[in-house]
Image (cartoon, rainbow, N blue to C red):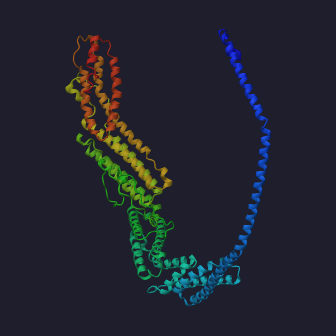
């Protein structure tokens, strides 16, 4: 293969001498290289042995140096240990001595403090005991690891005994000053009891809780007597008297006992909170007994007064004594687009009709949540079915009034300048919805909100069918009295339209109203989800009602399309019945084209002006009409048989495509 590579062809053999010379030259060079390498290796063994011996000697020297360094390091370490041994001993002795002195001082303080504590306790010197007891407790913490020593354990037991004795003694003093069944309270605050409260801060927290519990119970004992279930003032119609009573009591407390308890005890707030708990239990009990007597106005009156009182508590107190002790931060929701996203801090009588120009106004920030919300008003929740039934009845009457008003006033007057105004009844409906939702959310965010949502769904559907769909003009199929000749007359073209101008304006108004209701219903769903408890959000769904309004919109557009489409049918029928084979010369515009253009010029501007505020639905109307008319025109065009060349030219010249700018 190598030879064939060198001489691939017969002609290449002419260079054989040159190739042979090159190979011989390569052989001589290889021989020289081999000879040089063999000669060079003769001295390598001797040089290697000499280098190995030198390396071994260097290693031995290095090992000797390392050993010397190690020996010197050990000697240095031993010297350092001998030097620092005494210093370490002195350091340990100093530390132990300092600890011993400190411990002895603490022991002296503890022993003296225990003796003083026991003596002051017997003399009821609570002012001095408060500071001393805190110091003794702090010092005793340093002896926790020395409790195995009998003397230390004995001192610790004496401190505990003194604490127990103080606790029992303070409770006895408060019981004597504020007897549970006492008929008369002390004339003013006691300095002894004020100092006793300072001692209670240092004692077991249960002592403090017991003092607070007994004082509040004694302070509210009169309330339980005055507003017993069998008393006339206990019923809902006089609920204001309950809140007036506690206001007077809180003022009386501040004047007489405000300085007796430490500020961090928040006694005023604790009294108010306990009053709320007692009131909620008492109201729940009396409402269960007299459930049949609860009316809507009475219930709302009681709830309003109660929520007002809860709001007053939120302004006066921070809510730090409540179970959760948290106050939510205010939230700033997105801009308002309907009545449900307005400021909800106004009165319940505020009624604002929301126009479309108001839908872009920003919403005011929401006020912070009330930590006292529901602390009393929660008891009304089981009876909110009365409110829900009332709203069901009111909404039913409202829908009936809308129907009656529409029949009495008739369809809206044509006024294209206003661009198809929304029916005023829809704004009234959603404003009423807003009031109900805000009111119910103040009462409860649980199941009553779900029940109210069901009522909303019911009357949204009724509004869609009774007010919107129910008032759409009805189409008629009778057109026998019209002739093809009359349909093709330009002056009589207005007689073809099935809907009058008033009816066209009514359809556009209903379409605009349905669009407003669709958008506002979506916002209503979002607002309901914000108001209801998080666990119930999934049960809020107004998709079916939004679909209902979409159906109304679709039906309205379809009526407009059918009306214009039907007005053009006679002209197309006339086109298909013309004798096109007899046309002898090409003229100007055909009569059927004139008729169709006339109907379009009459209807489309009215629809356009009345749908000025909902341009997307006017566009849908145009698209649907085109999709309906063009196939019908093509179908009638195929019926124009037979047709001559001149007739075909007349069709082309007078077709809608050549007059497209006008149509």
Q: Position of residue 446 (x, y in %)?
A: 47, 57
The residue nearer to you, when weighing 146 against 165, is 146
Looking at the image, which residue is at 53% across and 88% down? 125
Tell me if 602 is positioned left or right of 146 in this view: left
Confirm whether residue 180 shows in the render.
no
Confirm whether residue 47 shows in the render.
yes
Q: Position of residue 318 (x, y in %)?
A: 44, 69
- Does 48 sit above or below residue 343? above
The residue nearer to you, when weighing 100 against 478, is 100
Q: Position of residue 485 (x, y in %)?
A: 23, 21
Looking at the image, which residue is at 38% across and 54% down? 393
Instruction: Specify the quadrant that holds the C terminus.
Output: top left
Q: Which quarter of the picture shows residue 187?
A: bottom left
Tell me if 323 is positioned left or right of 605 in this view: right
Q: Which quarter of the picture shows residue 600?
A: top left
Instruction: Specify the quadrant that holds the N terminus.
Output: top right
Q: Which quarter of the picture shows residue 32?
A: top right
Looking at the image, which residue is at 62% across and 84% down? 105
């Amino acid at each position: 293969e190598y030879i064939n590579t060198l001489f691939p062809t017969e002609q290449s053999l002419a260079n054989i001498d040159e190739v042979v010379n090159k190979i011989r030259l390569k052989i001589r060079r290889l021989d020289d290289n081999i000879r040089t390498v063999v000669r060079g290796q003769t001295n390598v063994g001797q040089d290697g042995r000499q280098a190995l011996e030198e390396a071994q000697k260097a290693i031995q020297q290095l090992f000797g140096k390392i050993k010397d360094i190690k020996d010197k390091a050990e000697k240095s370490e031993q010297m350092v240990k001998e030097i620092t041994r005494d210093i370490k001993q002195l350091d340990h002795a100093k530390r132990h001595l300092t600890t011993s002195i400190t411990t002895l001082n603490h022991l002296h303080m503890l022993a003296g403090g225990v003796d003083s504590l026991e003596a002051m306790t017997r003399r009821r010197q609570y002012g001095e005991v408060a500071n001393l007891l805190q110091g003794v407790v702090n010092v005793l913490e340093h002896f926790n690891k020395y409790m195995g020593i009998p003397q230390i354990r004995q001192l610790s037991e004496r401190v505990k005994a003194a604490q127990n004795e103080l606790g029992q003694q303070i409770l006895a003093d408060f019981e004597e000053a504020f007897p549970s069944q006492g008929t008369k309270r002390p004339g003013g605050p006691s300095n002894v009891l004020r100092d006793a409260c300072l001692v209670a801060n240092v004692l077991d927290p249960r002592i403090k809780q017991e003092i607070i519990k007994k004082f509040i119970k004694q302070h509210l004992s009169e309330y339980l007597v005055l507003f017993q279930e069998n008393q006339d003032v206990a019923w809902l119609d006089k609920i204001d008297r309950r809140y007036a009573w506690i206001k007077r009591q809180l003022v009386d407390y501040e004047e007489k006992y405000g300085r007796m308890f430490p500020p961090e005890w928040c006694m005023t707030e604790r009294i108010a909170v306990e009053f709320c708990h007692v009131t909620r239990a008492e109201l729940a009990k009396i409402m269960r007994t007299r459930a049949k007597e609860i009316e809507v106005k009475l219930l709302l009156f009681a709830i309003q007064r109660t929520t007002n009182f809860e709001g007053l508590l939120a302004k006066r107190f921070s809510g730090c004594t409540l179970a959760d002790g948290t106050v939510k931060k205010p939230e700033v929701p997105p801009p308002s687009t309907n009545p449900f996203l307005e400021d909800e801090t106004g009165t319940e009588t505020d009624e604002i009709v929301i126009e479309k120009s108001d839908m872009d106004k920003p919403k005011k920030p929401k006020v912070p949540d009330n930590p006292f919300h529901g602390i009393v008003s929660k008891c009304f929740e089981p009876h909110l079915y009365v409110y829900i039934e009332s709203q069901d009845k009111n909404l039913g009457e409202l829908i009936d009034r809308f129907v009656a008003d529409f029949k009495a006033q008739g369809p809206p007057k044509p006024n294209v300048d206003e661009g198809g105004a929304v029916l005023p009844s829809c704004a009234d409906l959603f404003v009423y919805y807003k009031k109900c939702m805000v009111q119910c959310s103040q009462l409860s965010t649980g199941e009553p909100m779900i029940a109210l949502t069901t009522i909303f769904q019911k009357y949204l559907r009724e509004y869609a069918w009774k007010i919107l769909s129910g008032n759409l003009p009805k189409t008629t199929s009778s057109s026998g009295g019209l002739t093809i000749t009359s349909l093709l007359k330009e002056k009589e073209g207005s007689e073809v339209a099935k809907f009058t101008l008033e009816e066209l304006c009514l359809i556009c108004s209903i379409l605009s109203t349905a669009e407003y209701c669709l958008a506002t219903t979506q916002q209503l769903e979002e607002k309901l989800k914000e108001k209801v408890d998080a666990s119930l959000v999934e049960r809020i769904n107004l998709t079916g009602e939004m679909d209902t309004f979409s159906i109304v919109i679709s039906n309205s557009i379809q009526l407009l399309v059918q009306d214009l489409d039907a007005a053009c049918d006679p002209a197309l029928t006339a086109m298909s019945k013309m004798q096109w084979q007899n046309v002898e010369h090409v003229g100007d515009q055909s009569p059927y084209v004139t008729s169709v253009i006339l109907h379009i010029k009459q209807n489309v501007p009215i629809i356009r002006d009345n749908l000025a505020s909902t341009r997307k639905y006017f566009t849908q109307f145009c698209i649907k009409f085109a999709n309906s008319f063009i196939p019908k025109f093509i179908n009638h065009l195929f019926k124009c048989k037979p047709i001559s060349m001149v007739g075909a030219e007349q069709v082309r010249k007078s077709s809608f495509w050549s007059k497209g700018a006008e149509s």
